[in-house]
Amino acid sequence: MVLLVTVERAAASLCAAVEKAQSWLSHPVVTALQFHGIWLVLLLATLWMLAGKARLRELQRQRRRTLGRPKGALAKSSGSRGSLASLAAEQEAGQPKLPTVTVVLPVRGCRSHSVANWRAILNLDYAGGLEFLFVFEDKADPAHAVIAALIQEVAAQRGGPALAARLHSAGAAERTSQKIHNLLAGVRQAGPDSQYILCLDDDVLLHPGLLASLVRDMEADPSLFMATGYPFDVPAEDAGLLSYCALSYHLPLIVPFSVKERTEFVWGGCMLFRAAEMRHDARGILRAWQDGGYSDDLTVASKCTELGLPIYCPGYSIFPQWLDGAYSLRRWWNYLRRQLYVMDTYSNPHNRRTNHALAAFACYAAWGVMLPATTVMLRLALWTLATLLLPTQQVYGGPGGSSYLWLRLFGVERCPWSLASLISFSLSIVYLMISLRWMTSTVLDLFCALNPALRRRQLDTFCWPKLWLGFYLNNAVMPLCIAYTFLTSHIDWSGIRYWRKGGKVVRVLHSFQKG
């Protein structure tokens, strides 16, 4: 009997706590927060839908080509969009030889997918002169011997003209990031006959016909200053939650690289420049890189927006980027900090305003979605608890019999707008999930259409519950990480520690190992 009374009292106290929590979560401020979050969620979901639609158009072009679309119809397409032709097909079609290109690839270390990515780069289909320049800090880099052997292997497999590939040691950076130091050395080493310079990262898998298509489009439109692309992270099958946190960082950023072909954004992993522009440096990009540069792509993007230079990002310029499955808490935190550190590096006042505005919007958008999502999850948790408690209480109660207990427990008697905001926000989240799932499926299909060596089962490795939890955690932490990163001056990147001051790199410590 005593136990029963104790249980009843505990249940009554818990019901009172649930009612009080429901009253807090039904407050007009919380309701306003949820309504405000709805438009951010709807905006992101709609942009993902538009990004997916743009990639779907490219996918349809690729499928029409594969099914034997008439050559006359292909010629009507603007530039070479929808036609990533192989070298043999270009020669058979009698197209003129394409301009010579130097591929500059800054390299540091060798990761799990590096060899496959380097092999894909060396085997690009291109009907023109092509030289590869792998740039290292020094020969002690473990990737140096691996790439040297790979070049010999690919050359032997081709059995034709010698493969024009060089390995260059740039030395240690002193006042720039090591990547920019390697890029500068690579641009200087580019052959005098090269008409284009392609700067790449080694952590993405290029499509065989990518370079030919980009060059052909640049040749067709002299007004284009440069071309770029963007990676799409593909997780390992056994990827942990923190890997999905890292993956979710790139998901909103795919939008500006998808919704229109002329964009204002640049991704440093794929930058195609006209060689004359880089040699003469009339736009000041190389000078900005050399003067304490840390972020190659944000510097270029800022120069382009400042000077009104067109940036081209076609629908086929998207690449799978294999994401490691094992991310420790330290590794994820460092990854996020490295992504956000660039927002407080700049080469001029315009660059600074742009980067700081991006950082402010990232904070606003992250918590603008995360906070109302938290209140909705708390509300749903309380509803679950109220459902369990309801059988232990009188269904009808309140002073003078004026209130139903279940209405109070579920918090729906205080403010009808509270219930409306909760339902509307939940529906917007469902729309967000559908849009991302559809966009992802379209992008994966596009990868298979662009690269015959890929199979869809290789790419279907997403665990959606982990992805959404990672998306939530990443947005929860991002504003805190931005604040911490702006308040500290150093960052660690691939065993090197950098210090910044006034938006520029002022000190570099090599072979740094965190104790």
Image: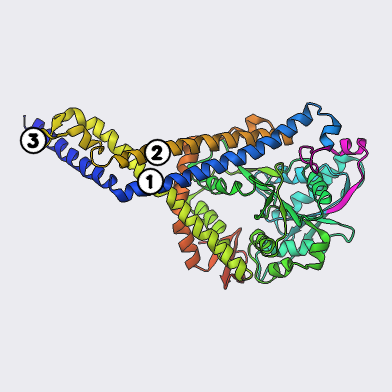
Secondary structure of residue under mark 1: helix
Position of 498 with respect to 485 (left or right) is right
Looking at the rendering, which quadrant does residue 446 occupy? top right
Name the residue located 86 percent from the left edge and 33 percent from the top edge.
72
Query: Is 93 within the magenta?
Result: yes
Residue identifier under label 3: 400
Name the residue located 26 percent from the left edge and 37 percent from the top edge.
412
**Alpha-carbon span between mark 3 and mark 2:** 34 Å
**Alpha-carbon span between mark 3 and mark 1:** 34 Å
Residue density around tag 1, few if under 14, some if 14–19, many if 20 or more, within 10 Å: many
Residue density around tag 3, few if under 14, some if 14–19, many if 20 or more, within 10 Å: few
Residue identifier under label 1: 34
Residue 196 rendering spot, x and y as whole percentages: 82, 55
Looking at the rendering, which quadrant does residue 469 occupy? top left
Position of 69 with respect to 97 (left or right) is left
Residue 228 rendering spot, x and y as whole percentages: 71, 51
Looking at this view, name the residue that lies furthest to the left: 1
Magenta segment boundaries in residue numbering? 76-101
Position of 151 with respect to 59 (left or right) is right
| Dominant SS type (magenta) | loop
- Compare residues 478 and 337 and report the one nearer the observer: 478
**Residue type highlighted by circle 3:** Gly
Which mark is on residue 424?
2
Name the residue located 82 percent from the left edge and 45 percent from the top edge.
212
Query: Is 405 within the magenta?
Result: no
Q: Is residue 66 above or below residue 506?
A: above
Residue density around tag 2, few if under 14, some if 14–19, many if 20 or more, within 10 Å: some
The reply to whether the C-beta atoms of the residues labelled 3 and 2 are less than 8 Å apart is: no
- Mark 2 vs mark 1: which is more N-terminal? 1
**Residue type highlighted by circle 2:** Ser
**Residue type highlighted by circle 1:** Gln
The reply to whether the C-beta atoms of the residues labelled 2 and 1 are less than 8 Å apart is: yes
